[in-house]
Image: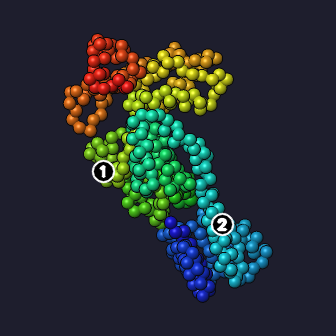
Amino acid sequence: MKRRILLIEDDRTLNRLLATELRREGFAVTSVDTWAAADAWLADHEPHLLITDVRLPDADTLERLRAEPFDYPVVVLTAYGSIRDAVEAMKAGAVEYLVKPVNTDALLMVIRKALDQADLRREHQFCLRRLEAKEGNQRFMVGISPALDRVKELIEAVAPSDMSVLIQGESGSGKELVARAIHDQSPRAKRAFVAVDCCTLQEKLFESELFGHERGAFTGAERQKKGLIEGAEGGTLFLDEIGEIDPSIQAKLLRVLETGTFRRVGGTRDLEAHVRVVAATNRDLEAMSHAGSFRADLYFRLSGFIIETPPLRERREDIPYLVEHFLRHHNFSRRVNKTFSNAAIRELVAYDWPGNVRELKNVVERAVILSRDKKTVRPEHLTFGRGGRQQAKVVLRFDHDPTLEELEAAYLRLQLEKQSGRRARVAEVLDVSERNIYRLIKRYDLANA
């Protein structure tokens, strides 16, 4: 991504020399010789940095800086250098004050320093989020199940690209953690990961938060505000529960994906969006697009690469590993090193987890508290949701129309996993004899299930 520099210099020879040198260094340079020409360009564009002479034919730069501070760094050039003028320039908001004739090496060093500092300021507000997310990938990647391995493979495949990704799955199944893993394994990993919860923001507030707004765009907009798209520049923008956004926002988001540009609320300039969009939903966006409640063209843009996060009931073999992980990383009651009894683990594995990994974490933490000073957490310390140990609907997934034998084998495998291999309990659930269960296990080669 080339950094855009606006150069305002009325000495045409110097203007041409500086512009040529900066372009040679890889910058995208627009050069003008008056503030009027600069204002005309700024009406439709926004630079990463401004270089300007102090005394121009139609305006005094320091007065402009005092009247309207810029959101990007300003480097001031002058042929009449003095300590007083330098101090005034810094007070007005300039990041550097250089005296002509300008040494190009010194100018380049100032430009790079100013751009680096601007990047640091822009990303500072996201640093804490990034630190908190440092172990996000690990938190989700706990387990040995084939379902989890499939997700890992998809993440590794898509992460190096800039392709938009749609993550689908039930609430609590780890969609944001998959998005963080995509970001962390991508070339954008050193830039910001910005998560937006589409459920919690009202339409007008959402538009302002996402795209930013110009001063005076609406009542209370006393100054320009950059949005989350600009905050995520060079990084990843994660839109959680994208199925909840208003149709008008859907149209503007589609424009970002198609053109790579956007406008702040109340703005007339097209700004570039150098971000990768990763979206997540627990709704069926394809069905919503057919019904007209979600834009079909936006769905097709987002669904170029889809990752399904498996519900916890489809990766029961991961539950003991997740429990151990939560025990090691909980941030309370560390006086006693806890373990879960085999009976307690069997209870957890048998439960269908409508709230998925998030619910499991809550149950484990409650059990740690309720077990008080006891070293072993037992079934009596487990408290599930209001419905207790209600069983969720059984889902068997095939990529083809299964035969009756395939259905029988898949359901038997599911019950063996769910009952932690207790064949007597499986026989009870299936209402057949235990001897019959042994026969079926041998028939379908499920001895290790």
Q: Residue furthest right?
A: 83
x 65%, y 26%: residue: 334
Q: Is residue 105 visible?
A: yes
Q: Nearer the viewer, residue 392 or 297?
A: 392
> How far from the left and from the top, in percent, is residue 391?
37, 21
- Front residue of 416/195: it is 416
- In terms of image quadrants, where is residue 418? top left
Q: x and y percent of residue 351 in the render?
A: 42, 22
Question: Toward which corner of the image does residue 68 lie, by quadrant?
Answer: bottom right
Secondary structure category for the residue under label 1: helix
Query: Label 1 belongs to which residue?
Result: 296
Whole-angstrom CA distance, mark 2 to mark 1, is 45 Å
Location of residue 423 by image quarter: top left
- Closer to the camera, 13 or 315? 315
| Residue 368 to residue 260: above or below | above
Residue drawn at point x = 40 percent, y = 62 percent? 259
Q: Quadrant of the C terminus?
A: top left
Which of these two is toward me, 386 or 69? 386
Amino acid type of the residue that numbered disc 2 sits on in the rendered structure: Lys
Amino acid type of the residue that numbered disc 1 sits on in the rendered structure: Ala
Q: Residue at the spot x=44%, y=41% of the render?
A: 175
Q: Which mark is residue 113?
A: 2
Q: Is residue 410 left or right of residue 57?
A: left
Neighbour class for label 1 at 10 Å: few (<14), some, many (≥20)?
some
As displayed, is residue 289 above or below residue 265?
above
Picture disc at residue 111: none
Nearer-N-terminus badge (2/1): 2
